[in-house]
Amino acid sequence: MSLHFIDTYRPIAILMIAALGFAAAPLALAWLWAKKFSPRKPGPLKNATYECGLETKSNVMLWFKPEYYIYAIVFLIFDVEAVFLLPFAVAFSGLSLGAVVAMLIFLLLLAEGLVWAWRKGVLTWV
Amino acid sequence: MDQQLRTELSRQGIFTTTLEELYNWGRKSSVWPLTFGLACCAIEMIATTMARYDLARFGAEVFRPSPRQADLMIVAGTVTKKMAPQVVRLYNQMPEPKYVIAMGACAISGGPFKQGYNVLKGIDRYIPVDVHIPGCPPRPEALMDAFITLQKKIESQSLTGAERPRHLDPDEPSEFVVPQYGAHDLEPPKNVKLWNITLKNTPNAPCATGEDGHRKD
């Protein structure tokens, strides 16, 4: 590893250490404060599951099925597509035919994915 | 550091403070209430947080939807006996330091429903109340006044010593008994550690006394 390499990355290392300290210092301070002044007061009622003030009736460690996650993924993909579309639109008049075709294929692939998701019934709320 | 030196230093442009003052300043400037309304007083509470009265000026605009993140419980409205256990349980689930404002006649005494069989005659029978506001309902200005009163109370609390607030004292409880539905009333009907006032109906009981200590009537 050359000296130049270390010199290049030294500011980043310093920043990372500072960032760690920035996060750790308040936590450490809070911990010390609790040790010195503020006693811990846990209790069965305080640690009970919060259910709008009511007593919990059954097991609270339920499994919430994320049945809508494919919708979220589809949204994410089209979100990223928008990021690609913007430079495409800006540079549109100066692009070669090959670039335009490549971009259209990219769009077509995504549209195809949307059709697939639609036919699979992802877009209907369960 | 005595007050004279502090004044002198601040005149020279040097700001001095103590850990206790910083702590109290931090606590009083971010008292987050619990999102929680019981009756018509809650409408006034909502109005207090809106643009016209703007409770955000005092650092209390963030109404938390969970007791885990809340510092202040504004008991805004009639506490029915059906609802009292839930109120107490929510208070218990709040982390320390926690404060309570009893807003309106119902929350402090039962108000116009005091004779009703199903109304709790004041939430201070079960949880420690810091500020009581009378009124039916109290205007937003009254709630702000109660809030400023609470801030003054927080500001004056000491960090150590016998006079320190409840949350800094390891012997003081953080949880209070949650009443159960009984056959005729809540069980227990009151928390005797908090509410040990015996109301005597004697003819010579002192009521309104003047400045000289004698009864006015």
Image (spheres, coloured by chain):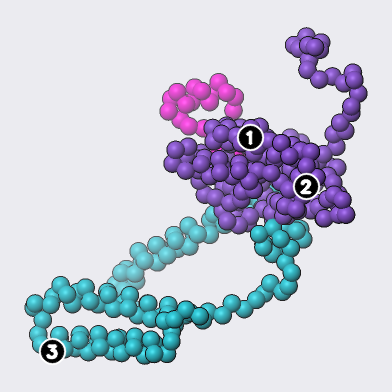
Q: What residue type is labelled 1?
A: Cys
Sequence order check, earlier mark of 1 and 2: 2
Q: Quadrant of residue A117?
A: bottom left
Query: Which residue sits at x=35%, y=64%?
Result: A11
Dominant SS type (magenta) = helix
Task: Please rate how many residues cluster around mark 1, counting C-alpha atoms within 10 Å: few if below 14, some from 14 to 19, many from 20.
Answer: some
**Marks 2 & 3 on one chain:** no
- Mark whose residue sits in front, 2 or 3: 2
Up-down relation of residue B214 to residue A77 (above or below):
above
SS for tag 3? helix
- Which residue carries the number 3 mark? A98
**Marks 1 & 3 on one chain:** no
Task: Please rate how many residues cluster around mark 2, counting C-alpha atoms within 10 Å: few if below 14, some from 14 to 19, many from 20.
Answer: some
- Which residue carries the number 1 mark? B136
Please identify which colour was used for chain B in the image.
purple
| Residue B212 position within the rendered picture, expressed as x and y whole percent measured from the top left | 78, 9
Query: Which residue sits at x=75%, y=53%?
Result: B82
- Which residue carries the number 2 mark? B118
Chain to which mark 2 belongs: B
Q: What residue type is labelled 3?
A: Gly
| Residue A54 position within the rendered picture, expressed as x and y whole percent measured from the top left | 71, 60
Chain to which mark 1 belongs: B
Up-down relation of residue B149 to residue B84 (above or below):
above
| Residue A103 position within the rendered picture, expressed as x and y whole percent measured from the top left | 20, 85
Q: Quadrant of residue B217?
A: top right
Magenta residues, start to end: B1-27
SS for tag 1? loop
Tell which of A74 and B175 is nearer to you.
Answer: A74
| Residue A126 position within the rendered picture, expressed as x and y whole percent measured from the top left | 50, 80
